[in-house]
Image (cartoon, rainbow, N blue to C red):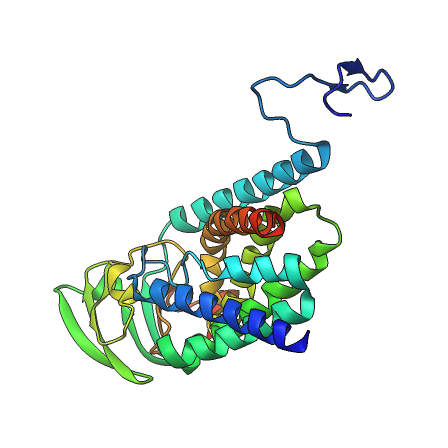
Amino acid sequence: MGNEKVTLKGNGRRSEPLSGKIKFPIQTRVWIGTLAIAFAVCLAAAAVVWLLPGSRRVARVSVDGAVVREIDLSAVTAEGSFVVEGVGGTNTVTVRPGGVCVSAADCPDQVCVKRGWLEGGAAPIVCLPHRLVIELVSGGDGNALDAISG
Amino acid sequence: MQTKRLTRDAMLTGVALIIFIVEAQIPPLTSVPGIKMGLANIITVYAAFAIGPADAALILAARILLGSVVAGNLSTLMYSAAGGLLCLLAMLGLRRVLSESQLWVASVIGAAAHNLGQIAVAVAVTRTPALLAYLPVLLMSGMIAGLFTGLCAQALVKRMSRK
């Protein structure tokens, strides 16, 4: 039926003869469009999250939801490290003026180490196996997010 | 018939488990926690569409349990279970709406649902809502991975029905 060369005047769409071009049925095209829009929204949201200006200068290290250490990165003058005891393993956290990273860890996936320096943006450093999270928070006044996570 | 069903489901679980274990050996591609191809989901999508909801759920549950015993640990079990459950529910919900040539759509949405479950567990476990910042990136990777596994499953369904 779809291959016949007929013009459907009623809905303004034409069923075209077989050509080299792949033509999806209307329902599939709606799905493609919807998913493409969803993807674009995610892309925009990801860009906002990553490019969020870094005005929050306090690095908060928590293990299993409890804050174990807070470092004011603007007060850091020289690079230094300390070891954090996570759940089932340890992470070596390194700070430098304005930045923080996990420099070593005995977790299996090493995702926290590969994440590199955290110097801004909303995405925290996370080591899921050890339940360790390092996030940037604004010091002192504390916003809504701090109230929840703290 | 029961024996045939048991054998088929066991074989599909075995195939899914092998894919899962092999994929677990590949180091993470990115520094974003939770991103992976999820190739074992090809079997879940296939089972959900070509066999039925009950069998798909059994195969998925067996694969997740055995997979975390063989290639993971208790915490990976929680992420997989929450993600897998949401993914399965999303796909079974879409099963009635989609035709066979739109099977990949279920996989894409199922993968996104998997990411939602995964991050919900991560937020609950670490008690850090800031982890939600990873959600957009996870959803993007999930949609791409879901598209790939969905197209694989669609090709599989097509070939298996041609006997």
Left or right of B76, for residue B162: right
Q: Position of residue A65 (x, y in %)?
A: 43, 79
Q: Position of residue B59 (x, y in %)?
A: 56, 71
Look at the image and tell me whether residue A65 can be seen: no
Q: Position of residue B82 (x, y in %)?
A: 55, 72
Left or right of B80, for residue B71: left
Residue at x-position 76% and y-position 18% = A4
Q: Compared with residue A41, is residue B39 higher up or lower down, i.e. above or below?
A: below
Left or right of A83, for residue B159: right
Left or right of A90, for residue A8: right
Q: Position of residue A13 (x, y in %)?
A: 77, 20
Nearer to me, B88 or A104? B88
Q: Quadrant of the N terminus of chain B?
A: bottom right
Residue at x-position 83% and y-position 22% = A11
Nearer to me, A89 or A95? A89
Residue at x-position 62% and y-position 67% = B56
Q: Compared with residue A85, is residue B87 higher up or lower down, i.e. above or below?
A: above
Residue at x-position 71% and y-position 45% = B99
Look at the image and tell me whether residue B132 can be seen: yes
Q: Compared with residue B108, is residue B4 higher up or lower down, i.e. above or below?
A: below
Nearer to me, B69 or B140? B69
Across the whole image, how many numbered discs are drawn on residues?
Answer: 0
